[in-house]
Image (spheres, rainbow, N blue to C red):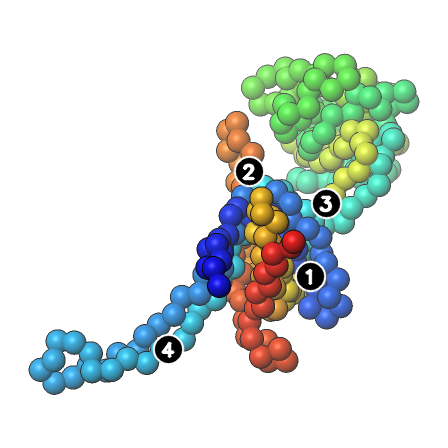
Amino acid sequence: MARKAPRSIFGVHGATPYNRTTGLPYGELRVVKGSSLSLQGELVEQMGGSSKYSWAAEEGGITAELTLNVGELPNFMFELFLGKAPTDGSAETSGNISTAANKNGSTVINGTNGIGSVFLLTGSSANLKFGKYVMKALSANTFNLYYMSGIDLGRGTDGSFLTDDLCVASALSVASANVTLPSFGLEFAKAGTPAFTTGDTATFEVRPVNSGYSTVRVGGVVSQSFPEFGCLVYAQRRGNQQMLELDLFRCKGAGMPIPFEMGQFAGFEVKAKVLYDEALDGIFDKRFVEPT
């Protein structure tokens, strides 16, 4: 009988983490730049006497670790490696302005004598610019507005910074009526007789018109939970149709970098310990097929 061609692994196709209880997938990681399963073993040696070499050796523990280097950031990555699943929102055809809240002091946002709310200026949704904003009281009824990044200044009608401290509007007055900022799509509602304390600040966030959004707060002491998961890892299907799958029964991850590199797509390298599954009496299955 002729010898078979050597069996090789070429490339990586993807990885699919799954829920260990239901078996259902969290989703598929498709932009996978690399993956490895490290099985590092230890040999315990018997030393003694005049011999410079060991008399015997027996296998010690084996550390199993999965590494995934991916170029995408689906929600389940936050859940599995940072302990909190993001919340997705549907399309916002008029964008969104969050509820403004006092940051320093308590006089800027005040439903009785201050600014009651910040809302969308009628007909100006196309000018809403993504990011975080800070209002700073200049006097009892005037304030400056600061935009925390220039990332979206060109959306709709161009906005611009007036000074290096990121001020985009100076001495906006609510002395007698609402004040508007059309180039940013914003209107500030006067409430009663404004009585700001100079230097008090308030903040709010804006999302432009969008097809969907996602938010998450990471690091909560009570709310975070790092679930164990299973993971299927696939080598790239070869030209001769050979396919290889690893099914890692029980994985546990904690921690994930979120890099920002100039002019490069980010790569997210995560690691997970591969643990013994008592019910299956193992840590992974390898499945190989050579279709005809």
Q: What element carries label 3?
A: strand
Q: Which of marks 2 and 1 is nearer the N terminus?
A: 1
Q: Residues within 10 Å of mark 4 (few under 14, many from 20)?
A: few
Distance in Å between CA atoms under marks 1 and 3: 22 Å
From what the image shows, is residue 72 above or below residue 4?
A: above
Residue at point 32%, 75% (across, down):
43
From what the image shows, is residue 100 above or below residue 45?
A: above
Decide which of 214, 206 is in the foreground and name it: 214
Decide which of 156, 113 is in the foreground and name it: 156
Q: What residue type is labelled 1?
A: Tyr
Q: Mark 1 points at which residue?
A: 18
Is residue 230 at all visible to an observer of this figure?
yes
From what the image shows, is residue 79 above or below residue 203?
A: below
Q: Which amino acid does label 2 sit on?
A: Ala
Q: Which amino acid does label 3 sit on?
A: Thr
Decide which of 128, 144 is in the foreground and name it: 128
Q: Mark 2 points at which residue?
A: 266
List x then y, in percent, for residue 120: 85, 27
Q: Mark 4 points at which residue?
A: 60
Q: Mark 3 points at which residue?
A: 215
